[in-house]
Image (cartoon, rainbow, N blue to C red):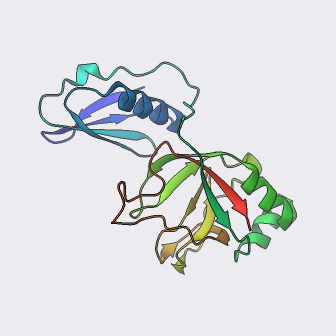
């Protein structure tokens, strides 16, 4: 069930039941270029529609399809050294060999569902179900910038050193956030991503 809630004078918050609904709606609304809309910000179960005060929320037609829209943008390829501290643990927990984990993770096609946690941190969907593990029971106080990790249905890359509770599979030198670029995020919502072992 979709709920549209006021969110201050210049925004509405739309609540959904699933991430697939969030992605479909946000993609459709971006493509529609709705009059008065300034920004569309996705999260796991919500879409924040920021407007200039002239927007009519009655224009928010929710797509009926439950199939996630496939972006047409070019795929961003991120080179990864698969030597993460949790690679062996993930393999054991999933009943696989470390090489199987590497091949499954790098063989999947991902899409950025939303960004959050810190600037440049993209939550990517498309992780093979066999690799979907809950977050670590004890988060690390420091995860190194460039760490490639998984948790639940997501994979992602830490843009900066920070605390974190995801399982570390490897590392990359890719720059996820650069203030001198437009947009500054390498992986904005809707971007297709593939990881390439090096």
Give above or below for 80 relative to 110: below
Which residue is at 66% across, 64% downward? 79
Residue positioned 34% across, 29% down in the render: 3
Residue 166 location (% of width, % of height): 59, 66
Residue nearer the viewer, 58 or 160? 160
In the image, taking residue 86 as reference, residue 71 lies left or right, namely: left
Q: Residue 100, position in %: x, y?
A: 85, 59
Q: Quadrant of the C terminus?
A: bottom right
Q: Nearer the viewer, residue 162 or 179?
A: 179
- Most extreme residue toward the bottom is 141
Quarter-of-image position of residue 25: top left
Above or below, comparing residue 189 to residue 173 in the picture: above
Residue 132 can be seen in this image: yes
Q: Is residue 31 above or below residue 90?
A: above
The front one of 80 and 21 is 80
Task: Tell me residue 96's x, y (percent).
Answer: 86, 60
In the rendered image, which quarter contains the N terminus? top left
Residue 193 vertical placement versus 6 (above, below): below
Q: In the rendered picture of this protein, how many numbered marks are placed on residues?
A: 0
Q: Is residue 15 left or right of residue 57?
A: right
Observer able to see residue 16: no
Q: Residue at x 73, y 46 (%)?
A: 129
Measured as percent of width and height from the top left, residue 165 is found at 56, 69
């Amino acid at each position: 069930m979709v709920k549209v809630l006021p969110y201050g004078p210049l925004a509405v918050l739309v609540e959904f039941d699933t991430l697939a609904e969030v992605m479909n709606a946000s993609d459709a609304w971006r493509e529609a270029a709705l009059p008065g809309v300034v920004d569309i910000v996705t999260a796991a179960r919500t879409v924040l529609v920021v407007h200039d005060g002239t927007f009519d929320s009655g224009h928010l037609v929710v797509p009926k399809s439950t199939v996630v829209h496939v972006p047409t943008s070019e795929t961003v390829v991120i080179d990864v050294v698969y030597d993460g501290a949790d690679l062996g643990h993930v393999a054991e927990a999933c009943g696989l060999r470390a090489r199987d984990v590497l091949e499954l993770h790098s063989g999947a096609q991902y899409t950025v569902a939303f960004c959050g946690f810190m600037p440049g941190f993209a939550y990517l969907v498309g992780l093979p179900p066999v690799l979907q593990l809950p977050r670590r029971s004890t988060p690390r106080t420091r995860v190194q910038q460039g760490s490639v990790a998984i948790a639940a249905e997501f994979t992602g890359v830490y843009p900066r050193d920070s605390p974190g509770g995801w399982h570390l599979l490897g590392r990359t030198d890719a720059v996820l956030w650069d203030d001198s670029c437009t947009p500054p995020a390498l992986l904005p919502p809707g971007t297709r991503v593939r990881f390439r072992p090096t």
